[in-house]
Amino acid sequence: MTVLVTGGAGYIGSHMVLELVDAGERVVVLDNLSTGFAWAVADRAPLIVGDAGDQALVTRLIRDHGIEAIIHFAASIVVPDSVRDPLAYYRNNTVNSRSLIECAVNNGVRKFIFSSTASVYGDPTEVPVKEDAPTQPISPYGWSKLMSEVILRDVGRAHDLRYVILRYFNVAGADPRRRTGQSSKVATHLIKVAVEAALGLRSALEVFGADYPTPDGTCIRDYVHVSDLTRAHSDALRHLRSGAPSQTLNCGYGHGFSVLEVIEAVKRASGVDFKVEIAPRRAGDPTRLIADSYRARTTLGWQPRFDDLSTIVAHALAWERELMMRQTAPPECAPVATATVAPN
C-alpha cells in the first residue's frame, strides 16, 4: 500500500517523504510547486504536479497507486499574507482540504493525517497550551486551519475515516544529512531569516515588535525540529494502522525562546554579529505560544531527538550553506528550482 503526501515538495513535506522512504514505505507526492521544489523530493518517490483540491486527479492517484493513507501538508502558511489576502487562504487551505477529504471518503482511504497549527489557539491565556484549550484564532491562517479541522472531525464521525490532527508549533531546522531544508527565496520563518542575515544574504534582520509583555519584549515561541515533527507523523501513521482512534495532538517541546534569544543563538553559531532592526508589530502574532505535548508523547510514543535550540540552529545554518553552494554550482551540477510564483 502507498502513502500520498500532498505538499511533499515543500519544507516539511519533503522531510516527511524522506522519513517515509528511509523507512521503506511506498510514497507518491502531489505538489503544485507553487512554493515547493521538484529537486527536494526523494528520488524513490514519484512527483505528480497538481493541486490537492483537484478531485479528478486525486481520485486517479488513489486508484492507480493503491493509496491507503494521506498525509496532507499542502497549504499556505504565512500569517501576515493571510491577513492581506484571506480569500486565498480560505480557498487553498480550507476549500482544497474539504475536496481532498471528500476524495478520501469516496475512494476508500481510511487514514488521514492533517498538518494543522498552534495558530488555532490564537493568543492563549495559559501556557503551555493543551489540546483542549479554547480555539480562538487571530488570523485568517489560523481560522483556515481550524475550519479544516472541523470538517475532518465531522467527516470522521459520519464516515469510516480515522485521522490524526497534528498542531505544529514553530518548525525549524533541516535534515541533519543536508538533503533538504527551508529553500524558499521569500523566507518568513525567524531562524531561516536570521541564518540568511548571518550569511550576508540580508543586510539586516527585522524584529516585529519589542513591546510585548515578555521578559525582553519580544514574542516567545516553541521551536520544534522538522525531523522530530516528521517522526511524529510516522508515529501517527503507525497509530492509525493499529486501528487506534482519531486524535488531535500538539507537536512542540514544551518550552520556548524569545525572538531575541533565537537571534543570539544564530549569532553564536555563525560567529557573525549581524544587524538587527526593531519594526512595528505584525498583525496576527500572538505573544507566547508553547506546547503541552504530553498527549502526543503518551498516545503516539513520540520521542523527540533534537530538543535543543543550538542543534536546530546548527542544522539550519548547515543547510543554508549547502543551499548557497548548490545555487553557485556549475549549471550541470546545480538542481533546478521549478517553483512558480508563490506559503508551507
Image (cartoon, grey):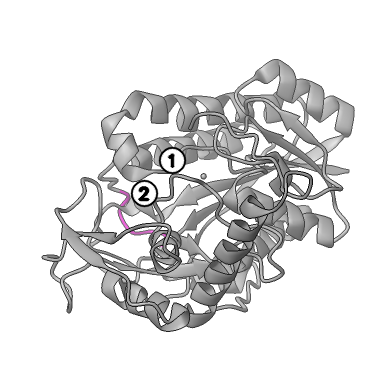
Looking at the picture, which amino acid does disc 2 mark?
Answer: Val
Within 10 angstroms of label 1, few (less than 14), some, or many (20 or more) residues?
many
Q: Residue at x 64, y 67 (%)?
A: 300
Front in this rendered view, residue 128 or 150: 128
Residue 259 locus on image (x, y percent): 29, 69
x, y percentage for residue 290? 36, 69
- Secondary structure of the residue carrying numbered label 2: helix
Report the side of 271 relative to 106 (left or right).
left
Question: Looking at numbered disc 1 in the image, what kind of residue is underneath it?
Answer: Lys
State the extent of the magenta-drawn residues as a range: 131-135
User: Does residue 188 belong to the magenta stretch?
Assistant: no
Residue 242 visible in the snapshot: no
Q: Is residue 287 above or below residue 59?
A: below
User: Contact (CB < 8 A) between labels 2 and 1?
Assistant: yes
Which quarter of the picture shows residue 213? bottom left
Q: Position of residue 73 (x, y in %)?
A: 59, 43
Residue 120's label in the rendered image is 2
| Residue 259 - label | none
Quadrant of the rendered structure where residue 218 is? bottom left
Q: Which residue is mark 1?
A: 145
Main secondary-structure element of the magenta-colored stretch = loop
On the image, the x and y values in percent for residue 74 come to 57, 38
User: Which residue in the rendered view is the most extreme toward the front?
Assistant: 330
Question: Callout 2: few (<14), some (14-19), or many (20+) C-alpha neighbours within 10 Å?
Answer: many
Q: Residue at x 60, y 45 (%)?
A: 10
